[in-house]
Amino acid sequence: MEDRIRSGCPINLTLEVLGDRWSLIVIRDIMFGNRRHFRELLQNSEEGIASNILASRLKRLLEHGLLTRVDDPSHKQKGIYSLTEMSISLIPIFAEMGAWGNRFLPVSEELSIRAQLLEEGGRPLWNDFMEELRVLHLGAERDPQKPSVFERLQAAYQEVVARRQSA
Amino acid sequence: MEDRIRSGCPINLTLEVLGDRWSLIVIRDIMFGNRRHFRELLQNSEEGIASNILASRLKRLLEHGLLTRVDDPSHKQKGIYSLTEMSISLIPIFAEMGAWGNRFLPVSEELSIRAQLLEEGGRPLWNDFMEELRVLHLGAERDPQKPSVFERLQAAYQEVVARRQSA
DNA sequence: TCAACCAGTTTCGAAATGCAACCGGTTAAC
DNA sequence: GTTAACCGGTTGCATTTCGAAACTGGTTGA
């Protein structure tokens, strides 16, 4: 992947970092699927990413500051990938992309429910979710009063899956 | 470019349509630069797109319903490319991408001023701009009361360029 | 001890990218 | 009426990237 800068336009620079078919998929799985290890990302991948592509994307995202990696103390080979403020700040982009995809593309019901909730919740919900991701990935303090957005999104997804399986 | 669908996730589907380094650049230039002909897109390209890449992207965007093309009555060879409701609806994504790029990437001042205005204006400004693009590209009725967002963005850009040249 | 698991790497054919030269038709200036 | 510039692309070719599958060397738990 070429790293020469084509122009200083913010749209272009964003595309130079994220403009391919896998980078945002990897971040999405870490963010919404809470997958933190290489194997989790590889084996639970909805889109079937290849291991070499995953490895190269993780490396690139680390270099660009969108992820960090620390060794897992419970297993000498495992690494734990975490989001950074930079990638947590992608939430509004994910939300808008999800809303656009929901409106114009042939999405499946169970995979679109989270995008729908995120759209309906609007910026206040996005802020709550970002705060929550900071707790999970950056070790920020958790506000024990607030209900978890992550759990709400997960529950809504599970509910659709369960409903469709029983039908 | 592969057209097989990997999953029904709205984020993934959006990436399958727009997830490359050029598609959004082409739409951006039509949208914010009001470039409607092949040569305009080719020669005024900030990032220096190659003619074969431009041709293949225009074709692909037409196929996906993000652009339409009509013959230019003033010149037998020219075609006029227009946005559709689908591409006009990308405005929130562009706005969020611009805001993110402005915050985290080494943008140049003159190319970031429009992204900044779009961010500050928020959803009301985006809606005005979308309405204006519908007039320009879909032939919708113009509200003669409303000042043009397009002109405001252009003026702000020209002002920064002029200021920097005199400095 | 050994099978399962771990994070990747290697290999190789297929596809996409990027550059430059080129194409035949059209238009506007002389 | 001729001609040079312009029009939307296409072609050829070298380089890079993608993607599938097999593989590596090390770790862990039964």
Image: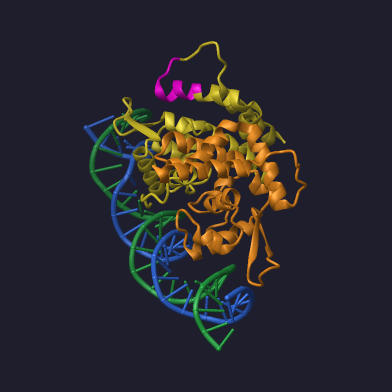
Chain colours: A orange, B yellow, C green, D blue
Magenta stretch bounds:
B131-141
Is residue B106 one of those drawn in magenta? no
Q: Residue at x 71, y 47 (%)?
A: A134
* Rendering quarter of residue A48: bottom left
Relative height, residue B21 to residue A56 (above, below) = above
Q: Residue at x 40, y 35 (%)?
A: B66
> Quick check: B157 left or right of B135?
right
For the point 48% across and 35% down, the residue is A100
In the rendered image, residue A65, in percent from the top left (x then y), is placed at: 66, 54
- Left or right of B73: which side holds A41? right
Looking at the magenta stretch, what is its main secondary structure? helix
Rendering quarter of residue B110: top right
Query: Could you tell me residue A28's position as x and y percent?
Result: 56, 49
Give coordinates of residue A39: x percent, y percent: 55, 64
Q: Quadrant of the C terminus of chain A?
A: top left
Q: Is residue A144 above or below residue B113?
A: below
Can residue B143 be seen from the camera position used here? yes
Residue C19, position in %: x, y? Answer: 45, 55
